[in-house]
Amino acid sequence: MSAMKTIVHDSIQCPSCYGPLKEQATGLICQACGRKVPLNGEIPLFTTPPTGIKPSEKLVRGPEIGTPWRRANWRFLEHQLARLDRQARILDVGAGRGDFDALLSDRQVISLDIYPYPEVDIVCDLTQANPFKQGSFDAILLMNVLEHVYETRAFMAALSELLRPNGFLIVAIPFMVKMHQVPVDYVRLTEFSLKRLGPDHGLALDELKGYYDPLFFLAEGTGNLRNAYLPNLGKSQRVVARFLLGGMQLLSGGLSRLVGPGRAHPPAEVRSLAPTGYQAVYRKI
Ligand SMILES: C[S@@+](CC[C@H](N)C(=O)[O-])C[C@H]1O[C@@H](n2cnc3c(N)ncnc32)[C@H](O)[C@@H]1O
Ligand SMILES: [Zn+2]
């Protein structure tokens, strides 16, 4: 398996019988049961990639690029990675186009997705097949993925199995964020679901924060008004609506200078507010 990263080569096994996999011209083959794992270029396909989805484009990412939620994700992940040992074995589940690669470049990481993006090491839906030994990883990243998984509980159970005792599951999940990657956008989980989901699967919830940014909400709302509602108005109504929208934007710009940027903090402090998303850290019991 010359082209494969060492950590990938050393980590994978036959999902059917746990036998060793050997690379051949047509794919990987289990030396014990003969199961074939096709390759897409150099990427082993342990499950069949979904069809009919619109693949994500590669975007430039960084600590100060993108929506406030994206930037909050960056800060959160950077902070969590700094707590891990340099040699920690990390599985980035739903890695997509490698949006956080700059934070992971000097790490022992396997990038996994259900779609064979060029940045991905392995294609696998862990609710369908599991090519890793139990307890293989010190940390699993689940950044903006759980909302795309229909079988939430089976997925959490599979991830929990892959963590070593005291290993971390690092999660970011949107809450009040518009639908994306449709139609593969299935759930929004509240803090109460996130609190139950871990312990149900052998994971203690070490940390839970919401990212709160009411002015980002407002900006999304005014954007929706401009793009989806205003074009349907009559000409004179549209002029008035544009004027009012402009006023709202001025007001929200002023407010933003007063209240500052969004903040991540534990949900109990602001129970009545809806966060843009949640950031959670679970630890394998
Ligand atoms: C919104 S993107 C997030 C990408 C990246 N983690 C980030 O935060 O920028 C969601 C990714 O999860 C992947 N995905 C969806 N269901 C999955 C599953 N069951 N297992 C692994 N990845 C999955 C999608 O293909 C997509 O690349
Ligand atoms: Zn086998």
Image (cartoon, helix red, strand yellow):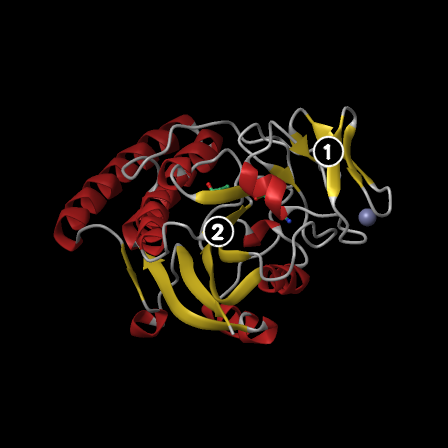
Residue at mark 1 to residue at mark 2: CA–CA distance: 31 Å
Say if 35 sits above or below 140 in the image: above
List x then y, in percent, for residue 110.
Answer: 53, 43
Q: Residue at x 46, y 29 (%)?
A: 231
Position of residue 116 measured from the top left corner of the image (x, y, whole percent): 63, 32
At label 2, counting other C-alpha atoms closer than 10 Å, the crowd grade (few under 14, some 14-19, many 20 or more) is many
Residue 122, percent across and down? 63, 39
Does label 1 or label 2 sit earlier along the sequence?
A: 1
Q: Considering depth in this image, is 88 or 210 the residue closer to the camera? A: 88
Q: Residues within 10 Å of mark 1 (few under 14, many from 20)?
A: few
The disc at residue 104 is none
Q: Is residue 182 visible?
A: no
Residue 254 left/right relative to 114 = left
Q: Residue at x 42, y 62 (%)?
A: 280
Question: Pointer 1: what residue?
Answer: 51
On the question of residue 255 being in view, the answer is yes
Residue 281 horizontal side relative to residue 245, left or right:
right
The type of residue carrying mark 2 is Arg
Q: Is residue 30 left or right of residue 246?
A: right
Label 2, on which residue? 89
Q: Name the one closer to the observer, 283 or 115.
A: 283
Seen in the picture, residue 109 relative to 153 is either above or below; the reply is above
Q: In the rendered image, which quarter is residue 111 located in? A: top right
Q: Secondary structure at mark 2?
A: strand
The percent position of residue 170, horizontal first and vertical second, equals: 45, 57
Residue extending furthest toward the left = 258
Nearer-the-camera pick, 171 or 160: 160
What residue appears at the point 52 percent right and 74 percent down from the top-left corner?
Answer: 285
